[in-house]
């Protein structure tokens, strides 16, 4: 198309002011405001300009007809753009992947009691930093520290949430255990290292210098803490003697980082926590462990081994443990630091703590989650409930859902959609127990005319969006991570594919 023809088409486009004066646009303005409507008009008209400039509306007479059609549909286009721009981008989705702690999908769903507590605290004022007994200013971390003390220090409170170890070297966690909360586990590691090792050296095994999600690396976090990293051993083998030989008068901390998102197998060696504790005691140097996930629930009771719990580490004698609130704990995003009260007090007095602290909503959600642990009501925490689901329970739900879909599709025209049940595996996700799997029953979808990727894309654009996984040219749905009250929406979305 010539420049002259394009110019003629540009002139036929109505201006923003012209469109704003139209009666139907005035109704949108009354509903959604002048600024939002004007912005939507400009976005729609700009797209039309791009189509003309790119020659997508080609030819003289045909192009004018195409443009007339586009201009005639401007109101509908503006209304769609307005609806899109004013709708929430962060949306509820159905997680049918079978990955319980799916980082991209928000990790741990909150318990109903946590949601209720957040709503109650957010709806008005609270005693976040106010002591109701004395009438004086209080500390915000008392609301959860009292519960952590009970769970981590009281053998009776912990007896149903963690397994008793047979190791004779393990003792009860110290009664002076304290816990503070920051905004995520990376912040917890940063605060702990800065408080305990600023200007000095931290000794860590080369085999534990992990990279977590989003390309964040433990050595980078350590560098920001102003502590110097002292690597010992090799990638696959580190002995207790490597740590001992590296200790100098500049050593401030021994660090163990749990390999939460990978495993090293074969010709490997790693000192046990008991050995590191003994060395730390002998040389009077604190020992810190970055657990990452940090379970308060005994995963061994559901057949998952190799994922240490917080209380296990504290009972062995680790001085400071850092872990996440929104992983195996099943609470909100938070970084938790538990351990010796005197060391935690140093972190609490660090000015960096104020920059990293969390708000009242996080405390409310965390407090309610911890109360479920104290009450031993593990099924109230969605993550724990999903972990504890048996293959038979999932299979019964899957069979019922498939039967419902097949009966609904059978009432209409012949369907090219095929549903099958097959055995599969769920995973914890979130960097927890990377080799651990939970047996499950999957619903496999295939279609006579649509590829698995197309089916998957259709599910993602349903309401609410459904996120599944694709394997062997089939879409796989795992009900372990689908809430039972979402089964109806999931069934309706599958029926629409037929």
Image (spheres, helix red, strand yellow):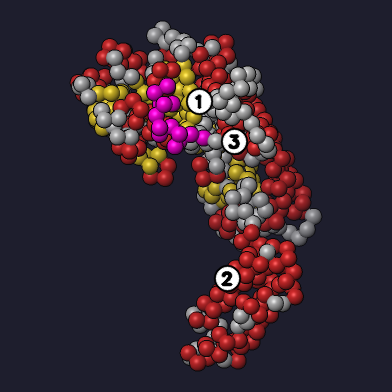
Pick the front one: 24 or 185: 24
- From the top left corner, tell me how far across and down residue 47 is, in percent: 55, 74
Does the rendering let one see residue 85? yes
Check disc 2 and report the residue beneath it: 43
Outermost residue to the right? 411
The local secondary structure at tag 2 comes to helix
Q: Residue at x 68, y 64 (%)?
A: 33
Dot 1, crowdedness within 10 Å: few (<14), some or many (≥20)?
Answer: many
Q: 212 above or below 1?
A: above
Start and end of the magenta stretch? 345-358
Q: Residue at x 35, y 40 (%)?
A: 217
- From the top left corner, tell me how far across and down residue 329 is, in percent: 54, 28
The local secondary structure at tag 1 comes to loop
Check disc 3 and report the residue beneath it: 361
Q: Residue at x 64, y 40 (%)?
A: 482
Check disc 1 and report the residue beneath it: 295
Q: Which circle, 2 or 3, is nearer the viewer?
A: 3
- From the top left corner, tell me how far across and down residue 364 is, in percent: 61, 31
Dot 2, crowdedness within 10 Å: few (<14), some or many (≥20)?
Answer: some
- From the top left corner, tell me how far across and down residue 215 is, in percent: 38, 45
Distance from Cα at disc 2 to Cα at disc 1: 49 Å
Outermost residue to the front? 135
Distance from Cα at disc 3 to Cα at disc 1: 22 Å
Counting residues from the N terminus, which is met first, the one under dot 2 or under dot 1?
2
Looking at the image, residue 353 sits to the left or right of residue 280; the answer is: right
Distance from Cα at disc 2 to Cα at disc 3: 36 Å
State which quarter of the image contains the C terminus: bottom right
């Amino acid at each position: 198309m010539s420049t002259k023809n394009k110019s003629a088409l540009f002139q036929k486009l109505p201006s923003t002011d012209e469109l704003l004066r139209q009666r139907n646009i005035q109704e949108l303005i009354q509903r959604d405001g002048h600024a939002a409507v004007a912005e939507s008009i400009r976005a729609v008209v700009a797209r039309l300009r791009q189509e003309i400039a790119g020659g997508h509306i080609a030819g003289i007479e045909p192009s004018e007809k195409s443009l007339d059609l586009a201009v005639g549909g401007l109101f509908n286009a503006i209304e769609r753009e307005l609806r899109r721009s004013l709708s929430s981008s962060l949306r509820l989705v159905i997680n049918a992947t079978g990955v319980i702690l799916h980082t991209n999908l928000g990790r741990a769903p909150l318990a109903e009691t946590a949601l209720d507590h957040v709503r109650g605290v957010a709806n008005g004022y609270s005693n976040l930093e106010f002591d109701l007994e004395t009438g004086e200013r209080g500390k915000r971390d008392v609301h959860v520290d009292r519960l952590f003390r009970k769970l981590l220090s009281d053998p009776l409170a912990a007896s149903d949430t963690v397994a008793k170890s047979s190791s004779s070297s393990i003792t009860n966690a110290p009664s002076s255990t304290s816990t503070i909360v920051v905004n995520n586990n990376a912040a917890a590691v940063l605060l702990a290292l800065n408080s305990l090792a600023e200007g000095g050296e931290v000794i860590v095994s080369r085999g534990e210098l992990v990279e977590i999600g989003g390309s964040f690396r433990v050595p980078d976090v350590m560098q920001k803490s102003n502590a110097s990293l002292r690597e010992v051993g090799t990638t696959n083998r580190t002995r207790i003697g490597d740590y001992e030989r590296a200790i100098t008068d500049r050593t401030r901390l021994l660090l163990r980082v749990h390999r939460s998102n990978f495993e090293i197998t074969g010709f490997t060696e790693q000192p046990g926590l008991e050995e590191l504790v003994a060395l730390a005691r002998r040389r009077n140097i604190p020992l810190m462990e970055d657990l990452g996930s940090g379970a308060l629930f005994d995963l061994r009771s559901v057949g998952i081994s190799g994922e240490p719990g917080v209380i296990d580490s504290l009972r062995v004698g680790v001085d400071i443990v850092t872990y996440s609130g929104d992983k195996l704990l099943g609470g909100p995003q938070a970084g938790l630091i538990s351990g010796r009260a005197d060391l935690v007090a140093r972190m609490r007095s660090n000015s960096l703590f104020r920059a990293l602290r969390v708000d009242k909503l996080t405390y409310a959600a965390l407090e309610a989650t911890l109360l479920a642990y104290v009450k031993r009501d593990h099924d109230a925490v969605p993550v724990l409930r999903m972990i504890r689901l048996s293959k038979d329970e999932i299979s019964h739900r899957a069979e019922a859902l498939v039967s419902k879909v097949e009966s609904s599709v059978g009432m209409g025209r012949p369907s090219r959609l095929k549903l099958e049940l097959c055995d599969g595996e769920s995973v914890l996700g979130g960097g927890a127990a990377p080799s651990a799997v939970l047996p499950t029953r999957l619903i496999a979808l295939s279609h006579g005319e649509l590829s698995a990727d197309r089916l998957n894309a259709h599910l993602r654009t349903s309401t609410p969006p459904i996120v599944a996984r694709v394997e062997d040219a089939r879409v796989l749905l795992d009900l372990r991570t689908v809430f039972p009250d979402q089964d109806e929406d999931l069934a309706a979305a599958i029926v629409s594919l037929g």
